[in-house]
Amino acid sequence: MMIMNGLIKGRLQSRYKRFFADIDLSSGETVTAHCPNPGKMMGLLETGTEALVTHINDPLKKLQYRLEALKENGVWVGVNTQWPNRLIGKAIHDGLITELDGYETVRPEVKYGLNSRIDFLATAHALRPDAYIEVKNVHLSRTEGLAEFPDCVTTRGAKHLHELAEMVSAGYRAVVVFCVQRDDCQRFDVAADLDGKFAEAYRTARAHGVEIIALGFGFSEQGLTFSHRLEVL
């Protein structure tokens, strides 16, 4: 579990300018929280939606609160894009991703490709080539039990997939781990209707041998916990 101390309940008033969210706290106070998610956050932004925020308590920060989760259909959905890399890093360390067992070293934020950084580079395996591991945050679910990515056009995401396919062609492994910050989905697929170019890059990457993994995490008022693996469609 990734514990988050001091989660505070409230309700979303509005999210604006991508990184700002006004939250009505249960105490009656209204605060402006940092929204660490530049995406459209489809399905999560209705006024009055239940929210969880953390109090940063850092005098150097302009905003003293950070939005962590919103509730959809009775389920807490994590929206903070800073968490997936930590969650997947811990999952690799704890042996929850068997495909990545056996590597002696796993380094974060390694430069590769054309002005890119891979989220993790796993090296020094006795039997397998180095693995380039990309992590993607997922919160979208438009169909019961189905998690989807992306929720809007992501040119950067398509670029990453093309570069990972090139790494496979060069003899390395490439793995994309979709970190689903909700535990009510059993299947994962690409939202081709929301970003056709990403979907095309995804199909090409899989055809080249890029490995796809989707992991679900449950969000509660105590923090995030690994829940289960999703079927990749």
Image (tube, grey):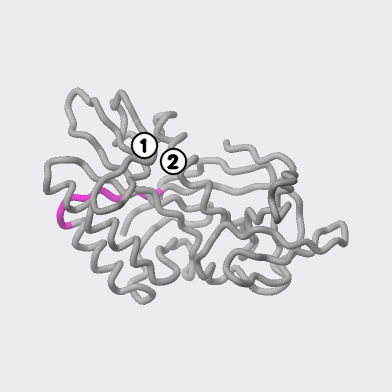
Where residue 67 sits: x, y (%)? 65, 56
Relative to 9, residue 101 above or below: above
Find disc 2 in the rendering and name its residue.
Answer: 88
Mark 2 crowdedness (10 Å alpha carbons): few <14, some 14-19, many ≥20: many
Q: In the shown orientation, is residue 176 left or right of residue 207?
A: right
- The CA span between labels 1 and 2 is 9 Å
What residue span does the magenta drawing correspond to? 207-214
Residue at image coords 47%, 49%: 216
Dot 1 crowding, Cα within 10 Å, few <14, some 14–19, many 20+: some
Q: Position of residue 209 (x, y in %)?
A: 17, 50
Q: Position of residue 161 (x, y in %)?
A: 26, 57
Of all residues, the one furthest to the front in this rendering is 60
Callout 2 secondary element: helix
Q: Is residue 182 left or right of residue 107?
A: right
Amino acid at pointer 2:
Ile
Check residue 46 for magenta coloring. no
Q: Which mark is residue 97?
A: 1
Q: Which mark is residue 143?
A: none
Percent coordinates x, y for residue 90 in the rendering: 47, 34
Badge 1 vs badge 2, beta-carbon distance below 8 Å: yes
The residue positioned 42% from the left and 47% from the top of the image is: 215
User: Residue at left 49%, top 41%?
Assistant: 87
User: Which quadrant does the N terminus fall into?
Assistant: top right
- Image quarter where the C terminus lies is bottom left
Kindly identify the residue that appears in the image at 52 percent across and 49 percent down: 82
Dot 1 amino acid type = Ile
Give the mark, 1 or 2, whose residue is nearer the N terminus.
Answer: 2
Q: Please say whether residue 212 is one of the residues in the magenta stretch.
A: yes
Residue lying farthest to the bottom in this orientation: 193
Looking at the image, residue 30 sits to the left or right of residue 65; the answer is: right
Disc 1 element: loop
